[in-house]
Image (cartoon, rainbow, N blue to C red):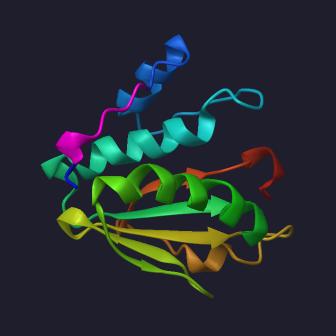
Amino acid sequence: MNDEDITFDWKKLPKQDFFIWDRSRIKMWVGGRGSTKTSSAVFSMMTMMRDPAYVGARFVVLAPVMKQMKRGPMDKFDEILGPTGMILNSVNGHEPRREMVNDIVTYFYNVGPHGEGIEAVGRGPENVVVYIDEAAQTPE
């Protein structure tokens, strides 16, 4: 299946469309349960992955603990992008990642309640997109 066979209706909320296409350096979505925060973040990453400007980019998804990651952003990532064929290889386990089209790799890390996992993210220009899930629970 190619992504031309799939249609997404991402206008559940009016601000969702703006968030998905916004290319600001920093953007944030604050909302309650069911306000499409996670799916909007994944859709936003999907639009970037299809953009030639992001070929070879590294994306990072962070969550306070891995249990939240696996039941939240990682599940939503696979649910949305899996059927499109954009995920070429899935690696689970200790250091999960998704190898994507256009030589893009998305890494999934937990940062722990005291920030102990943040060293895995590293610094520098390699990580182009950093998505922080449940930022209010993530240590400063």
Image quarter of residue 55: bottom left
> Residue visible at 44% across and 26% down?
10
> Residue visible at 61% across and 35% down?
37
Quadrant where the N terminus sits is bottom left
> Quick check: is 136 in the magenta stretch?
no
| Front-most of residues 110 and 14 | 14
> Residue visible at 79% across and 71% down?
112
> Residue visible at 60% across and 55% down?
73
Residue 12 left/right relative to 134: left
Q: Residue furthest bottom?
A: 94
In percent of width and height, residue 103 lies at: 22, 70
> Quick check: is 6 in the magenta stretch?
yes
In percent of width and height, residue 95 lies at: 57, 84
Q: Residue furthest left?
A: 52
**Magenta extent:** 3-9
Quadrant where the C terminus sits is bottom right
Q: Residue furthest top?
A: 14
In percent of width and height, residue 86 lies at: 28, 60
Question: How many numbered discs?
Answer: 0
In percent of width and height, residue 72 lies at: 67, 54
Residue 32 left/right relative to 100: right
Judge whether 129 appears above or below 101 on screen: above
Residue 31 left/right relative to 104: right
